Image (cartoon, rainbow, N blue to C red):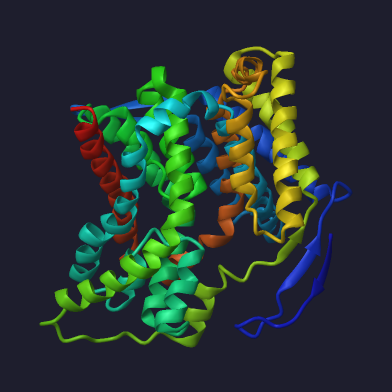
Amino acid sequence: MSTTPEATDATGAPPRTFDISLKDKGLWLLFGLIVVLAAIAQFIGPLTVPLGSVSLMLLPMIWALLMGVLISGQTWRPLPIDLQHTANAIMSVAVLVLCARLGLTLGQQLPALFAAGPALLLQELGNVFGSLLLALPLAVLLRMGPATVGATFSIDREPSFAMVTSRFGADSPQYRGVLSMYVFGSIFGAIVVSLVASIISSLGIFRWEALAMGSGVGSGSMMAAGIASVSAAHPVFADTIAALATTANLIAAIVGVPLTLWISLPVADRFYKFLTRNQKEVVKQESTGKLNALASVLDVPKVNLNPATSLLSLTVAGLVTASIVKKGFSFDMVITYALIVAMVGVAIWLSGLTNGKVPALITVILIGTYITSPWFPYASWVLHTAESVDYLSVITLMLAVAGLSIGKDLPMLRQIGWKILPVGFVVIAATFLASTVIAQVVLGILHR
């Protein structure tokens, strides 16, 4: 593993670039952990916990994520930081692998997607206003100060930093709020969505279609967690649930940025000022060291890892987990993963050819939709073959990788403070719930 410095970044520290390949023993260790964690999680299986009149289902993906966090975050012999960054690089490919597998359900679900069109579009408003209505007042009650705006205007993934920086500056409390929510979502996001979706699904008051759309919150890992929990509650409709959630997540990725920039962030700022109009505002000045420590979560090195190497490791691990789920191995599994690798390879190549103007995620989903649609002559064969690989096993695999990349972010929780814990939980839960409610109302009108 070789490391080279590059130009200094905004914090003054030189960002690193390191190369890692199959010649490095550490990469083999990482691959082995991914396979073992995903396999153990599948062997443990789901666990249902009754909570009065509702129930909570803990799925294999939760075990995979928690075991990964335990291994990467424990202090006795933690996973080396560079291997955690490598896991993060593999995670970007794992998301494409998951979307490729989900794409292999989309073509046959096109009639259901067209029928739910208005609900799919309007549920995105839940991603915009859900956290504003519930999480922002809570943050004001806890006196988080102006950081409230940054922490509650969205679930705060990567695009949020640019929005807040352009409006308030990188040294503002609002920016610190984005950083805090980003760290919280990275560590707890999938768990929160999984638990909330599981409990709400068990209530029996929402249509499964609405729950599926609510799962598309704009984050790959959170979407995967939502799909798994809703599908566990409604297994008969698993393929349609995956299709609806994937489409909702794609809509969030496409239209979420302008909606958040032009509506959610300005509304959050004005709503915060309205709620605190009678308060004597005291802006807590954070030390430069603390702000730099928080910002360091974004100062990740560039990992030069061949995508083909990531695909190889994910394919081996995927075949193991798929075999455990099906209680046996079949050649159809190999064909399915070969299709997935081809789809992801084409998507990455096209994205590189266009300098990112054609996102790999969209390409993967479009290819999967076409080869499983009525317009493709071999669609029936593709659909039948893909059934050999349960997409829930791919979700377990992806979250095992995610867990192994999270340990490096745990120290940031000490810098953030306890207030982000309840606020972050409500931000994510309210986003899911608001989208679900909107979808439920629209579907009720459409099917009246």
Viewport quadrant of the N terminus: bottom right
Q: Is 110 or 440 nearer to us in this picture?
A: 110
In the image, residue 296 sits, relative to residue 241, either above or below, namely below
Residue 431: x percent and y percent?
32, 51
Residue 71, compared with residue 275, is above or below; it is above
Residue sitting at the far left? 278
Q: Residue at x 64, y 38 (%)?
A: 97
Counting labels gives 0
Measuring from the top left, give residue 429's x and y in whole percent: 31, 49
Q: Residue at left 40%, top 25%?
A: 232
320 vs 261, left or right, is right
Nearest the viewer among 397 and 273 is 273
Q: Residue furthest right?
A: 23
Q: On the rendered image, what quadrant is the C terminus found in?
A: top left
Residue 131 visible here = yes
Tell me if residue 71 can be seen.
no
Give x and y (percent) for residue 131: 28, 58
Q: Is residue 41 left or right of residue 238?
A: right
Quarter location, residue 86: bottom right
Residue plotted at (48% across, 53% down) = 253
Q: Of 77 and 37, which appears nearest the observer?
A: 37
| Residue at x 32%, y 35% (from the top left corner) | 211
- Estimate the x, y position of residue 286 in percent, counting from the top left: 40, 84
Q: Quadrant of residue 12?
A: bottom right
Q: Nearer the viewer, residue 59 or 76?
A: 59
